Amino acid sequence: MKKSNLSFFAAPYVVWMALFVVLPILMIVVYAFRDAGGGFTLDNFARIEEYLPVFARSFLLALIATLICLLIGYPISCFLAREGAQFQRVAMMLIMLPMWMNFLLRTYAWMSILENTGLLNRLFSAVGIIDLGNLINGGLNSLCAALNDLFGLALKVSRSTNMEYFKMINTSGAVVLGMVYNFLPFMILPIYSVIVKLDPKLVEAAYDLGADSVTVFRRVTLPLSLPGVLSGITMVFVPAVSTFAISQLLGGGKQLLLGNLIEMQFKGSAYNPQLGSAMALVMMVVVVICMAVMNRFGEGEEQAVML
Amino acid sequence: MTKKPSALSRVFMGLIFVFLYAPIFVLIVFSFNDSSSRSIWSGFTLNWYVQLFRDQQIIDALYTTLAVSVLAAVIATVAGTFAAIGFYNMRRRWSAPLMTINNIPMMNADIVTGVSLCLFFVAAFSLWGQAAAWINSSLGTHLPEKLYLGFGTMLIAHITFNIPYVILSIMPKLRQMDKNLVDAAQDLGCTWMQAFWKVVVPEIKPGIVNGLLIAFTMSVDDFAISYFTAGSSTANLAMRIYAMTKKRISPKVNAVSTLLFVTVLTLLIVINVREARQEKAQRQHAQ
């Protein structure tokens, strides 16, 4: 059958994409290979070497956050899919609801919870957990000192025994927490939408054929939900590795991430768009390679729709 | 197999919901706090709400957020609908690479999209400056020679990252549609314009509505792309809050979050109750 002639409907958008998607990306590539005067240089990439620890930290923290999201998101999607239709509808609404509040507001709320004089530390000291921590640290210190004396070891004996609060904000743990909190819905939604459509007859058939529940999960449920898992991982990892607001708010500028570096090159004190472009380009390439490698595992599977 | 949900799974889900809502709860409670502390409770007040409506900066930011989100969502939905229909009717050889490009803004990190658009706008403005200067001097017109990042550039950026989501939600509906419907309509005497309005649009309407909602959500939630494309004269709510976190944050922010949360919650409840009612009516109709 001859396709009808409506394909010209896409023409304006093709022009729009060329202008506002393709050209800007090309600008990044061009800037990455330029010096301040406009000549060709590879200096920007050489300078990135100084920032390798930041690259490593960004990818590590994003990876940890993605793993935690997966470990929470997968089971919760399975549990949800077993509930009644009404329950599922309300639960999904509750999971989506925080997304309509700006994520900076939600991250800001964590600041007041995690602060040194914040709510969680108040709770801890009221219940006596902080005293308990001091006690344990004191015990560990004397134990280590004894071991050091006995065996000539060099174990740490300087654990603090007079803490007034646990240090939670401005640590990498707080940054990971912020990532998990903000991006967890992006993990749950795609996995849930795949699992809920999974044909229960397949699982039934596997049980009938003698598989135990571990085998059923490994050979039936998991492979069939893989597209959702892969798209969830992408949707958490990409924003996590490039965030700069979360690390600014919860890391207090001490846990510098890639996003903060790039931001500083464009808007901050260290104005250097060429270097910033090179960083953005390297990040983009590494992320694309990661995704390409990962998607090989799910090859042939249908692309999961995200929302 | 119909495994009943176990108590353990309910507890797990409960904990996750506590995790998701605890910070929001804290935000709301401290919007009524009678001091500017964000962790010590010192009595009930509505003072922060009163002050919120006197704070022109926050009100402006709220207005900017809503204006950009509504405009971007509506424009992106219209443009995305046409684009999706166009892509659908294209030969695969053409549509496949175009869809890949279309996916770029969704797959790319926000910061990369923001930075790339920022570079592009600055370069485009300097080109425009030269062109305008030349035109002004040769024709004696008064075109503005200097353009700045602002509301317009932010809007363009939002439209750009919204359209892919709209296309993504319309495409499946187009694929489900019976291809012969358009031909049938045209055989029966419709022009392609009439076929489009009377056949295609009603068929894909759920996808269009869904796309509009996703686009709006994305725009309201966006920070990074706006941050790089809005310049220094315009700010949406997220940018305003980010700027505040570098100094001292006033509980007015808590008040504005509470208002947003209540609005969204009400909207969602209304939508859900309506949907549930419609489904019920349909079921009764079927019986």
Image: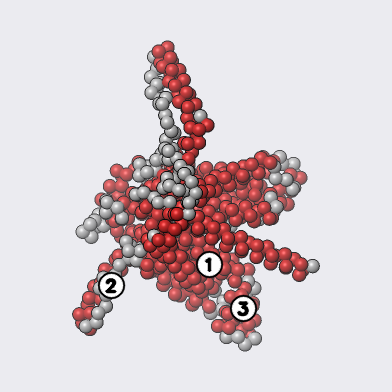
Q: Is residue B7 above or below residue A187?
A: above
For residue B280, side relative to residue B197 (left or right) = right
Q: Nearer the N terminus, badge 1 or badge 2? A: 2
Disc 2 sits on a residue from what chain?
B
Secondary-structure class at tag 1: helix
Q: Position of residue A112 (x, y in %)?
A: 45, 44
Instruction: Identify which residue is drawn at 48% across, 54% down.
Output: B46
Quarter holding the C terminus of chain A is bottom right
The secondary structure type at the circle numbered 2 is helix
Q: Which of the pair B131/A217 is nearer the observer?
A: B131
Q: CA distance from mark 1 to mark 2?
A: 33 Å
Q: Residue under label 2, please give it.
A: B128
Q: CA distance from mark 2 to mark 3?
A: 43 Å
Q: Earlier in the sequence, mark 1 or mark 3?
A: 3
For label 2, the crowd category at 10 Å Cα-Cα, with few meaning under 14, some 14 to 19 and many 20 or more, is some
Q: Are marks 2 and 3 in contact (CB under 8 Å)?
A: no
Q: Position of residue A145 (x, y in %)?
A: 41, 16
Q: Specify few, some or many for label 1: CA neighbours under 10 Å numbering under 14, 14-19, or 20 or more.
A: many
Q: Which numbered mark, 1 or 3, is in the foreground of this view? A: 1
The residue to which callout 3 is attached is B199
CB within 8 Å, label 1 to label 3: no
Q: Residue B29 versus residue A58: which sits nearer the camera?
A: B29
Three-letter amino acid code of the residue under disc 2: Trp
Residue placed furthest toward the top: A150
What residue did someone put label 1 on?
B212
Q: Residue furthest right?
A: B287
Q: Is residue B130 left or right of residue B59?
A: left
Amino acid type, residue under disc 1 in the picture: Leu
Q: Chain of mark 1?
A: B
Q: Establish if B284 lies above or below A172.
A: below
Give the x, y percent position of residue B263: 53, 60
| Label 1 – label 3 distance at C-alpha | 20 Å
